[in-house]
Amino acid sequence: MATGKLVLVIGGSGSGKGTLMASARERFPDIVFPVSCTTRAIRPGEIAGQVYHFVTNEEFDSRIEAGAFLEWAEYGGNRYGTPVSEVTGPLSEGKLLLHEIEVQGVRLLQKIIASDELVTVYIDAGSWDVLEERIRARAPITDTELAKRRERYEKESSFKSEATYVIENTNGGVEQAIEDFVSLIARLRSEVSDTA
């Protein structure tokens, strides 16, 4: 029977996760990108149903009650959840899945997904000062929201030593980070196709 792999991508806000994931999506159209649900507002340039299903708090609650999430967590006053339907089917079909997630979600998934089907990739963008600069450059942000992101950064950073792989994405190194990330995903993709 085919065994897929779920690749979880972890890193603080501003670490470049989105850029790296977009590069992999562009190069490997056969990879599955599970679409999470979130209660946060859609941002300019985002397309509903591409990275997130944007839902109301009431809808999120009803999905929790129905057992529709593998895991869910709250960050910055918004909730994020990984739908069961987006992960279990493709995994059982022997596919490679690539999913951006928070550390809290990783810990929950580690309890329910077999270790040989789970890979974690930590994106290391350097110090908080570097990330703060990137976050402020992206869009206006309140001091309160920035403080929440710093707290999240500290939680995410604590995971680095546990990650299966670490990709460095320090200032000025995005092209190398993309190359390293894409090469890692290509290797994992070939491992999955070899067993399919």
Image: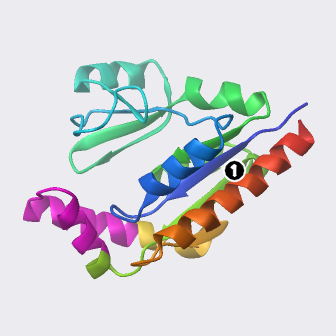
Q: Quadrant of residue 187?
A: bottom right
Q: Please tell me which residue is depicted at 49% across the width and 47% down the height of the picture.
A: 22
Q: Please tell me which residue is depicted at 34% across the width and 27% down the height of the picture.
A: 48
Residue under pointer 1: 118
Location of residue 26 with respect to 89 vertically, above or below: below
Location of residue 88 with respect to 110 vertically, above or below: above
Q: Is residue 139 magenta?
A: yes
Q: Could you say whether the residue bearing mark 1 is in a helix, strand or loop? A: strand
**x then y, percent, for residue 162:** 60, 70
Q: Please tell me which residue is depicted at 11% across the width and 57% down the height of the picture.
A: 140
How many marks do you count on the picture? 1
Which of the pair 114/196 is nearer the observer? Answer: 196
The residues colored magenta run 131-155
Q: Quadrant of residue 139?
A: bottom left
- Quadrant occupied by the C terminus: top right
- Amino acid carrying label 1: it is Leu
Judge the density around disc 1: few (<14), some (14-19), many (≥20) Cα neighbours within 10 Å. some
Query: In this orientation, does residue 106 appear?
Result: no
**x then y, percent, for residue 135:** 24, 64
**x then y, percent, for residue 102:** 44, 53
Q: Please tell me which residue is depicted at 47% across the width and 50% down the height of the picture.
A: 101
Q: Main secondary structure of the magenta part?
A: helix
**x then y, percent, for residue 87:** 61, 32
Q: Is residue 183 magenta?
A: no
Horizontal placement of 73 versus 114: left or right? left
- Quadrant occupied by the N terminus: top right
Horizontal placement of 169 versus 56: left or right? right
Give the color scheme: rainbow, by chain, secondary structure or one colour. rainbow
Query: In this orientation, does residue 119 appear?
Result: yes
